[in-house]
Amino acid sequence: MLKNLLFLVLILAATNTFAQDTLKFEKALTVASGSRYGREATYTDLLAWQMANGKLEKPTENGAFSAGKDGQKVLWKAIKADVNGRFSAFSRRSFQTTNNPFLNPGGIDRGSDYIYITYTSAKEQTAILNVIGGNSLFFNGTPHMGDPYASGYMNIPVQLKKGINELFVRGASIVPMIIINTKKLLIHTDDVTMPSIVLNQANGVLKGALTVSNSSLKDFDDLHIKTVLNGKQQEVAISRIAKLSMRKVIFELDANAITTPGNYNLEIQLVQNKTKVDQKTIVIEALANSSTHKQTFVSKIDGSLQYFAVTPQLNGWKPNSALFLSVHGAGVEAIGQAKAYKSKDWGTLVAATNRRPRGFNWEDWGRQDALEVLALAKDQFKPSDKQIYLTGHSMGGHGTWFLGATYPDKWAAIAPAAGYASLKDYGSADGKIPDSSKNIVERMLLRAGNQSDVPKLATNYTPLGVYILHGDADRVVPVSYARQMKKLLSGFHADFSYYEYPGGEHWFGDQSVDWPPIFSFFKWHTIAADSAVNRIDFTTSSPGISATYRWATIYQQTQPLQYSRIILTRDRKLSSIVGKTENVALLKLALTDFGAKTPVKITLDSLTVINYTTQSVNDTLFLEKNNEAWQIVTKIDKRDKNPLRYGTFKEAFNHKMIFVVGANGTAEANLANLNKAKYDAESWYYRGNGAVDIIMDKEFSASKYQGRNIILYGNSENNTAWKKLLNDCPIQVSNSQITTKEHAWKGDDLAAYYIWPQQDNKLLIGVVASTGVTGMRAAYANQYFAGGSGFPDFMIFSSELPKEGSKGIKLAGFYDNKWQFDEKNTAKP
């Protein structure tokens, strides 16, 4: 029967003088597996658990997959592809596998089906696997990123075995294809990041990026990309393309010969040792400098190429004008967002990307992308420091609420349109974040995601103007979300406007974002200078995300990732600061506005007065709370937790991180480590338009990779970089056990995610560890790339996690401010 699950169509195509066979399929099996993935650190996936533990039986039609809770067997069922080669899982009803909202928030069925397909290859060979749709997949047991948004650009090189090859795809609707080609190195033009050529600007050499795949069994370090544009050539070396992998690479193009608007052909050649191995042509647009356009930049997060869009100021850019940052909705490109706005005569509008049209919901790396673009735009357009504004639509409405509350001193006013405040209330594509749990471990994980609970930060809006726009007939994001925030703000906010557009659906034309009253509202709001702000009321969930408001910084918390708040009043006539704090261990105060040689009295929490005389006009004071008393700290240990390096685990994926794979163990362990790193790299590419260097442990050198975060895969026995980097870490993982200062767990089915500081003041080591192959397979799922998901500093679990969810977690929690274990901030079953 399995043989009959082979391809339906064999399409012979000639592309650039070489043949490629695209294999599609007509028959498959599907099962309602009951898997649950969302915005949490935990997930449930019985098929993944069976595969990790060697318990997965070969699917057959009407064969049993599992025994349901009602005693009935869950069976594999046969399905057929439609005329387009698309398979739809037989059931999309909700399977309530648990009463625990943490595992199944809202009882919503998200990706609970698996689709199974086989292909019989006449020989061992390499190919490209492209599965449109599906959240993730296993090909011959190896995990790969899916294509949940049906983008079509996941061209994954794979090795076919002689005989039966098995594909398991988690998802409800997929179009699977296997592409067998004679070229092992290919340029792909289905996911290109490109700038616009803007005439009469200093363009010169510009940067673009596209994907190159290597479906050979050899790494390539000697590749170049050569471009030809209107007779001008440019050539650059590109990053290594490892065997059986794909990577988005940066290239350059010389636009100096372009002098008139229009579309131009850009020839792109992939060159190895001066030999052209592939060639494609794409179109690039040249625009007048008054047109909305794209600009590219190299991100400091991972060294990849990103873009932002610009709607120029009417009649030309002028310094000291306004700057508007607009954040787009789910599925919307930044350039489309920017084009919805007419040019303003009093400022420039820039639209960030969130790294992808869906990306990270403007949280996590989406938040960082917005901040990168804001900094670049301020540097380029030199706006007035008093006139910076934030607005966005739909998911971007959430982004506006989130960024506005998280960084309230960056904006004069904000304007969310058709937005929802919290992922806990709305959820979006990856599901809702649960609001609470009775389980102590689950509460610890939720605490790591407190930054997503925007209403808890609502008092941060107090100094901002807020304009809320929502259509009263919106069925995508119901108007109840706007009314929720209107009611919340009405309790304390003196400066907000609210408008429900009569009959307005989710999108009612460009005025859904380019609404004139918003910009009129913006126009009479400005950011006050720090010297003029003498009262501070600021809340944060993590100094690592947001620490500073004006002249005060929450430098360290008492309870990590619980909410911290400061309410401070400064009186320069009396030379005093008086206030109260909540969950603050170390506070930093800038005393600039008091002047030099000024005696200052500071009273916090009605405790003993602190007397300090400023030495200069730029004094900064650190105050630490110990034993119910505040005292001056004269020396700060840079290794301690601080806003530049605070945790959690997700923070390690930053500062141009490099993946270091353990390859000093058994062949099976080494392969499991590599599979996990490649799956993470694919997921990072798909979700974040990113690119990551993957190296083997023997290639690692601290000096060579200085200034970069490091993600280690493996353990102390199979990753030779381990002892160089983690010798003093309290969490140790070997082939037989995981130990901490107080705990030990034995077995070959254990895994852990955690961080540890490098020997400097800002960089981190992220660790994806396991005691054995079964443990690493249980760690395959990378929930940490889901926007808003909460991961603490460390999380230790067994291979039971995919089956039992949080019951499979052994320990989770946060280090204290000295990077030591603190039992008060850990949780275990």
Image (cartoon, rainbow, N blue to C red):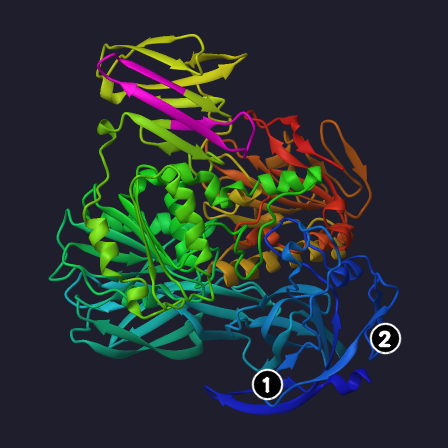
Which residue is depicted at the point 36% across and 47% down?
A: 371
Q: Are there few (<14), some (14-19), or many (20+) residues within 10 Å of tag 2?
A: some
Q: Is 443 in the magenta?
A: no
Measured Cα–Cα span from mark 2 to mark 1: 30 Å
Which residue extends farthest right? 71
Magenta stretch, residue numbers: 553-579
Amino acid type of the residue tagged 1 in the rendering: Thr
Label of residue 818 in the image: none
Q: Is residue 737 above or below residue 296?
A: above
- Mark 1 highlights which residue? 22
What residue sits right under mark 2 in the picture?
A: 63
Q: Is residue 34 left or right of residue 575?
A: right
- Camera sees residue 302: no
Left or right: 737 in relation to 607: right
Question: 521 or 370: which is nearer to us?
Answer: 521
Can you say which quadrant of the picture contains the N terminus?
A: bottom right
Image quarter of residue 115: bottom right
